[in-house]
Image: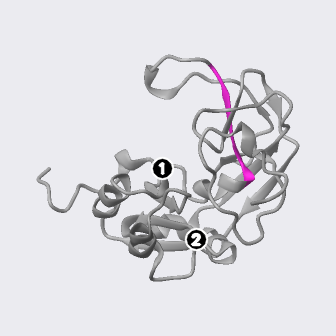
Amino acid sequence: MGADYPEGLIAREPAPPYDGEGGFALWHFSEDGSLGRFWPRSPAGGRGGRALVWAVDTRHAPLFWFPRDCPRGCIWPVTATTPGDRERFFGQGAAARVHVIEAGWLESMRSCRLYAYQLPVATFAPHEVGGYWVSEEPVQALGRVAFDDLLGSHARAGIELRITPSIWPFWQRVTGSTVGYSGSRLRNAAPHPGQSV
């Protein structure tokens, strides 16, 4: 684990480092290249809650190397992961992190251009979900990095990217396992192949 990763502040065990990770920093990912200042926003869908600016730390930034609405499941081994689960989920390759998307999103992955905005850490505090950080104050981006090749970004980082017709069989196994995981935009996934719509 990187010496500058603030382990004591994080609510859950972090994902393992990836190739070319770089130092601890906070990022906001968007397909909009014109952002600069970030204002606190209330959660989408009228769910209430505090208005916040959200960021992700460098260690967990690959969880966002996808088009915004792309459903994905991301997994990694943690201290509690059993030898059986290590073999079941990671035994076919050398990667310590595995990301899964559906085949229907492959073209979007190929064509998506993402912008990673680096945000100042001063007003941010760790969220209860490890790797995420929140600020109640507006923040100004320190800089911006473009990601033009999301498939290549995964490959260079040593993260295995799996492409499957449906994410659900994988995801149901993950949530009943001992691996660390993060799922995003799963409401956009194709219907489970074994269930009627």
Is 85 or 95 nearer to us in this picture?
85
- The numbered dot on residue 69 is 1
Asked if the stretch drawn in magenta spans residue 41, the answer is: no
What type of secondary structure mainly makes up the magenta span?
strand
Residue plotted at (82% across, 62% down): 22
Where residue 146 appears, x then y in whole percent?
75, 60
* Nearer to us: label 2 or label 1: 2
Q: How is the image coloured?
A: one colour
Of callouts 2 and 1, which one flags the residue occurring earlier in the amino acid sequence?
Answer: 1
- The numbered dot on residue 96 is 2
Q: Do the residues labelled 2 and 1 touch (CB within 8 Å)?
A: no
Where residue 3 appears, x then y in whole percent?
84, 56
Is 192 or 25 nearer to us in this picture?
25
Q: Quadrant of the rendered structure where residue 73 is? A: bottom left
Where residue 159 appears, x then y in whole percent?
59, 71
From the viewer's perspective, is 17 left or right of 139? Answer: left
Residue plotted at (53% across, 62% down): 76
Measured Cα–Cα span from mark 2 to mark 1: 25 Å
Amino acid type of the residue tagged 1 in the rendering: Asp
Amino acid type of the residue tagged 2 in the rendering: Ala
From the viewer's perspective, is 72 left or right of 177? Answer: right
The stretch of residues the image draws in magenta is 51-58
- The numbered dot on residue 98 is none
Is 186 or 6 nearer to us in this picture?
6
Please state, as top left, top right, bottom left or bottom right, where the N terminus lies in the image: bottom right
Secondary structure under badge 2? loop
The 10 Å Cα crowd at callout 2, few under 14, some 14 to 19, many 20 or more, is many
Query: Compared with residue 43, is residue 87 higher up or lower down, i.e. above or below?
Result: below
Query: Compared with residue 126, is residue 40 higher up or lower down, i.e. above or below?
Result: above
